[in-house]
Image (tube, helix red, strand yellow):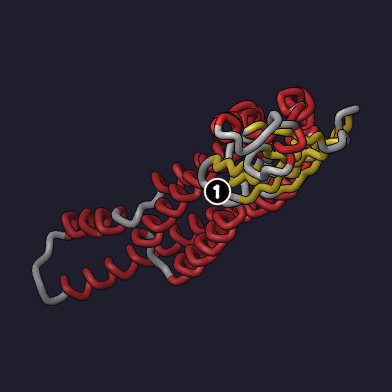
Amino acid sequence: MMRSMTGFAAATADDPRGTVSVTIRTVNHRFLDLQLRLPPVLADLEPRVRALVQRGLARGRVELQASVQARGAAAPVVELNESFVTAVTSAIEVARAAGLVQGALTPGDLLRLPQALAIRERSAEAETGAGWAEALESVVGSAVTALDDMRSREGALLKTDLGARKRTLVTLIDAVVVAAEAGRVQLEARLLERARDLSASLPIDQASLAQEVVRAAQRSDISEEVTRFRAHLEHWDALTDGDEPCGRKLDFLLQEMNREINTIGSKADGLQVSEHIIDVKAELERMREQVQNVE
């Protein structure tokens, strides 16, 4: 099945703890390039997310962004600076022994000392971070499935367009063969006419001359290149009808077809051949541009 490398999908899951959301954007790329953006609470889950995406996608630049919105209220965290309080207590004991102060250090005293206590907020999200793994995997799986559906729909459109262009190539290569054969006949006629002009003034073995004319005309034979070109077109159908990603192989086939048509253009003779070669190259270039978006 042909798939596009361009797509977008989003998925969200709710549970009693909160909401997990994932968005995925993809564009064309030679290989699979994953760019993951996860909040700190989900950072430890990145390898699992990466594995999920890799199972569903083969090529393309993938940008995945996840977010968590917890429902729990923020919970304060109070931390005691034990070394500071111990030092203060020791200093107070020295002062008491010297008769400078009376009474023990109280909790109220600690609250009046900024260095004694550190108070910060810890979100419920952070407290339950490990519990988001199942929800995150479910959302990522849903997003990848939705993305695959979108890329498959676009891939079907690409396949239709490329199939029409491939049929155009079949017609064009047939026209090249006809024009090349006409050019070969014309080349033989020109060579024979030139040989007759020369034989009128020079002694020439006619049998040897005829053989040389045939050899010269055979150098313009393009049957091997045409056979390979048509074989590439048949292989195209096998790739696009298969289940595996075919973008890179299609790109390689287009390179091979372009190489064959260049050889045909250098060997075949005739003005019409050149015109058809230009048309084939233009169609191959259009197909190459489209194939850059195929997974």
| Vertical relation: 198 (above or below) 294 | below
Residue toward you, 68 or 233: 68
* x and y, in percent, of residue 95 in the image: 57, 35
Q: Residue furthest front?
A: 99
**Is residue 43 shown to the viewer in this render?**
yes
**Is residue 50 shown to the viewer in this render?**
no
Residue toward you, 127 or 277: 127
| 246 to the left or right of 182 | right
Q: Residue at x 63, y 51 (%)?
A: 27
Residue marked by disc 1: 29
| 70 to the left or right of 194 | right
How many discs appear? 1
* x and y, in percent, of residue 81 in the image: 61, 33
Q: Quadrant of the C terminus?
A: top right
Which quarter of the figure has residue 268?
bottom left
Q: Residue furthest left?
A: 203
Q: Tell me which amino acid carries mark 1.
A: His
